[in-house]
Amino acid sequence: MAARRAARAGMRALQIFSAPPQYYGDKVAVKPERAARFREAVRSAGLDPRFVLVHGAYVLNTASPEADKYARARAGLAKELERTTALGAFACCFHPGSAGSSDPDGAIARIADAMTHAIESVPGTARVLIENTAGAGRTMGRTASEVGKMLALIPAPLRQRAGYGLDTCHLFASGHRIHASAQELDAVIEEFSDATGEAPSFVHLNDSEGALGSNRDRHALLGEGQIGIEPFRWLLENPSSHDIPLILETPQSGEAIGDDEDTPDPFDVRMRRLLEELGGSPRVP
């Protein structure tokens, strides 16, 4: 139904949860018949699997210094990749988690270990992608340097199946001045590309309720938050945003849509039209 709703909204990319995101999901598998139905829905919707992304559970904390929590998060990330592969999506993305009171370098090593374990455990081509974070508390993945260090610890034979993506709300909330000018936004993207050796593999398009550097992970409709609308035009003009999934994680309208209806959310349709309008205009020097 998610694929059908995406098609009805005019979308060309899709992000889903493969299991309830409030739980570790470390023992949850996708039944073959359900995976087959999803793959067929994606095909019928005219979506390219290269633009279908799975979002990992919110509770996975692969940076945790607590042995039990880390073990479950490590196993949960492997299951995320297993379900991603079964569903035919190109990758799963995840929030690295919080180091708590532990040393950041140790947390980075744990995150990389969990990614390595997932890739080694699940054959295929599906990738594991780090999502940058808003930076609250000791949350890892706030800076390009941290993301680069995580990826640098992935063994070379597995490195092509690892990567990262950027969330605009998280960038802004963690203090990156993507709203200031097209040049500053380009510089932020270049900083991540230089630190990791590659461009982002997806972008989450979200405005921010919180102020610059607030570390608040609160998404808003595009143009209705503290980032404003122009930075999204600049982003669409940046070559790194081309030919990758651009995913809206913006608020829903709250209209009652039945579980068995493929009616798209009106806010989603509005955001898609807005992005098409932004993408059609050249950058003003």
Image (cartoon, rainbow, N blue to C red):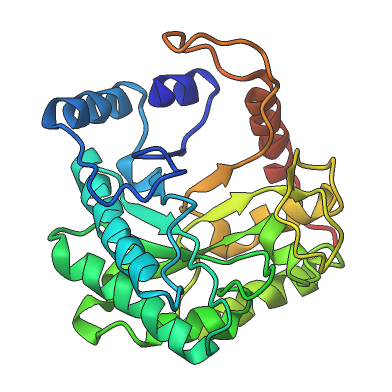
Residue nearest the viewer, comparing 227 with 276: 227
Q: Position of residue 273 (x, y in %)?
A: 68, 29
Seen in the image, is 246 located left or right of residue 171? left
Quarter containing the C terminus = bottom right
Residue 46 position (above or below residue 172): above
> Can residue 282 be seen in this snapshot?
no
Q: Hey, which quadrant is residue 266 in on the image? A: top right
Residue nearest the viewer, comparing 190 with 72: 72
Q: Position of residue 204 (x, y in %)?
A: 59, 51
Q: Hey, which quadrant is residue 158 in on the image? A: bottom left
Seen in the image, is 219 located left or right of residue 160? right
Seen in the image, is 274 located left or right of residue 32? right
Residue nearest the viewer, comparing 64 with 132: 64
| Residue beneath the point at 53% across and 25% down | 10
| Residue beneath the point at 62% across and 81% down | 191
Q: What count of labels does the image hold?
A: 0
Q: Position of residue 168 (x, y in %)?
A: 68, 57
Q: Position of residue 83 (x, y in %)?
A: 24, 45
> Can residue 259 be seen in this snapshot?
yes
Seen in the image, is 212 located left or right of residue 206? right
| Residue beneath the point at 16% across and 70% down | 120
Quarter containing the N terminus = top left
Residue 81 position (above or below residue 253): below
Residue 57 position (above or below residue 266): below
| Residue beneath the point at 64% across and 32% down | 272
